[in-house]
Image (cartoon, helix red, strand yellow):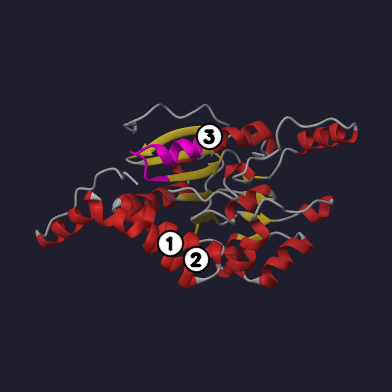
Amino acid sequence: MTQLLKRQPPPQTYGMVSFPASHVMLVIFNRPKALNSMTSNGQYELESLFAWYDGEPSLRCAIVTGAGRAFCAGMDLNEWNQANARRARGEHEAQPMMPRSGFGALSRRHGKKPVIGAVNGLAFGGGMEIVANLDLVVAARSAKFALPEAKRGVVAMAGSLPRLARTIGRPRATELALTGRSITAAEAREWGLINLVTEDAGDECEIMERPVVKAALELAASIVDNSPDSVIISRAGIVAGYENGSAENASRLLSENWESALDEGQNLHEGVLAFAEKRSPKWVDSKL
């Protein structure tokens, strides 16, 4: 399905971008032979893409998945090795290897709109760091998650360690980071890291036909059916509480920063009126 965009087309980016349903953007990490490991340039391209997504009024939810048998295996180690060699020679990098929004532009992203992960396979290193900061995550039964950085003498420094401590608890986060072992999708679901586990896809299955992608699209559809203003503000309240630690302070900031904007928006009034008139609401694109 072609998405009716209201601004400029999306910027050129690492991977493939499509609009498979109304108000939904799908991003496919597309280096399958390299297990979708990411280059530095690719990460900056993704940062531009997700900034564009937040600013595109017609879009309300995004999904990320991987081509081939991996979701994302982390940083391209060949590029990392070359960067280490340059630093050893005293050469300065033109820019940091990853953007301020973290690995893949997602592991430290705050953003405005939700992003759903459709984890089709390996989510190791940076791929796991992305998963730790997504809003919702669906995983295929054979998917595996790991932070193997300690096995290579490095550290997962793209934002996942403190986030995992909050999401799955200190003992489990410590187990992942210090042992480097992988966990299954079933374990990740039990630990509270992901929302749903689906059946695996066959070897010849097209990406759009994968159960994990279909499940993510169903979640996205349930989100875009709701008021886009309510989705943005509700997500902001959850992120504020998760990042800031104090539930009361986050509640105060949510009210101070967003309540008047919600009251002044068309969608609140439409939702209440539609309820009174016993009809489905007709939402307008958010102006927030």
What is the distance, in whole Å, between disc 2 and disc 1 at their CAs? 6 Å
- Reply yes or no: does residue 58 show up in magenta: yes
Residue located beneath label 2 in the image: 241
Residue farthest to the left, as pictured = 277
Residue at 78% over, 63% down: 179
Q: Which residues are magenta?
A: 49-61
Q: Is residue 246 or residue 198 the one in the foreground?
A: 246
Residue at 76% over, 33% down: 79
Residue type at mark 3: give it: Ser
What is the distance, in whole Å, between disc 2 and disc 3 at their CAs? 26 Å
* Left or right of 118, for residue 288: left
Q: Position of residue 88 (x, y in %)?
A: 90, 35
Secondary structure beneath dot 2 equals helix
Residue at 44% over, 44% down: 62
Q: Position of residue 141 (x, y in %)?
A: 56, 57
Secondary structure beneath dot 1 equals helix
Mark 2 vs 1: CB contact within 8 A: yes
Q: Decide if residue 255 is in sight here.
A: yes
